[in-house]
């Protein structure tokens, strides 16, 4: 491992306009990986890459403007900019960005609050297996936010989220089981729906050879 050698080649490639290298160079500055942390420099490189359609850079900008970066520096929080970059990445198919864009719509941060738009993006990401979006979609069904209240659907999504280790899904699944929030029939239906989802995912995304 040689961070300085890696930085040398990132800089050469980024300086010649390679979007992936620009994203990687921005990452090193955002997280102080071999250089001193400098979010302004990270943003400059990520913007160069993001304007070329580099999805990781677009998502990184969206995350930084949403949370203030790894150091959670509130001076960098800009929800409108976050929404702008997350939308670009989400529309290009990035599941992480879909989940975070949905969060902005759910809470009216940087965009006009739109619960139906929030559910739309949570659902697209959840159906493609994004665990955080699955957990968040479960919460929407549990609370009847943007969708009719449906505890069976909520439990289904919590199950699928928890299976992938997501904290939201695990928390609510434990809560439902501890307090017996579903009848036996509802629980069976939720498990059936989850099994259908897994089977469909397996059909669409079969495992590769060992």
Image (cartoon, helix red, strand yellow):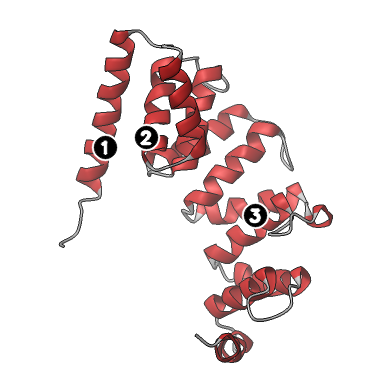
Residue that appears at 54% across and 64% down: 56
Residue occupied by mark 1:
198
Judge depth for marks 1 and 2 and give the one in front. Answer: 2
Residue lying at 68% horizontally and 59% vertically, measured from the top left: 70
Q: Residue tagged by mark 2? A: 160
Q: Are marks 2 and 3 in contact (CB under 8 Å)?
A: no
Q: Nearer the viewer, residue 192 or 148?
A: 192
- Indicate which disc, 3 or 1, sits on the residue closer to the N terminus: 3
Total number of numbered labels?
3
Q: Which residue is mark 3?
A: 63
- What is the residue that sits farthest to the left in this orientation? 209
53 or 104, which lies in front? Answer: 104
Q: Decide: marks 1, 2 in contact (CB < 8 A)?
A: yes
- Which of discs 2 and 3 lies nearer the camera? The answer is 2
Residue 123: which quarter of the image? top left
- Could you tell me which secondary element the residue under label 1 belongs to? helix
Identify whether 9 is placed above or below 46.
Answer: below
Residue 152, compared with residue 56, is above or below; it is above
The image quarter in which residue 187 lies:
top left
Q: CA distance from mark 1 to mark 2?
A: 8 Å
Label 2: which secondary element: helix
Secondary-structure class at tag 3: helix
Real-space CA distance between mark 2 and mark 3, rounded to the nearest whole angstrom: 24 Å
Measured as percent of width and height from the top left, residue 197 is found at 28, 33
- Taking the image as shown, residue 151 lies to the left or right of residue 185, namely right
Looking at the picture, how far across and down is residue 4, in whole percent?
60, 89
């Amino acid at each position: 491992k040689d961070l300085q050698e890696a930085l040398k080649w990132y800089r050469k490639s980024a300086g010649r306009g390679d979007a992936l290298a620009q994203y990687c160079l921005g990452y090193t500055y955002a997280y102080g990986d071999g250089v001193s942390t400098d979010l302004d420099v990270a943003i400059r490189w990520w913007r160069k890459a993001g304007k070329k359609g580099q999805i990781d850079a677009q998502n990184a900008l969206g995350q930084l403007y949403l949370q203030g970066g790894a150091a959670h520096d509130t001076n960098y929080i800009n929800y409108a900019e976050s929404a702008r970059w997350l939308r670009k990445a989400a529309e290009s198919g990035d599941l992480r960005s879909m989940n975070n864009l949905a969060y902005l719509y759910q809470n009216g941060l940087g965009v006009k609050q739109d619960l139906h738009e929030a559910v739309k993006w949570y659902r697209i990401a959840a159906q493609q297996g994004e665990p955080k979006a699955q957990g968040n979609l479960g919460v929407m069904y549990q609370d009847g936010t943007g969708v009719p209240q449906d505890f069976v659907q909520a439990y289904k999504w919590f199950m699928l989220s928890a299976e992938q280790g997501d904290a939201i899904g695990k928390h609510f699944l434990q809560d439902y089981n501890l307090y017996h929030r579903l009848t036996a029939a509802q629980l069976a239906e939720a498990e059936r729906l989850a099994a259908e989802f897994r089977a469909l995912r397996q059909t669409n995304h079969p495992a590769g050879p060992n």
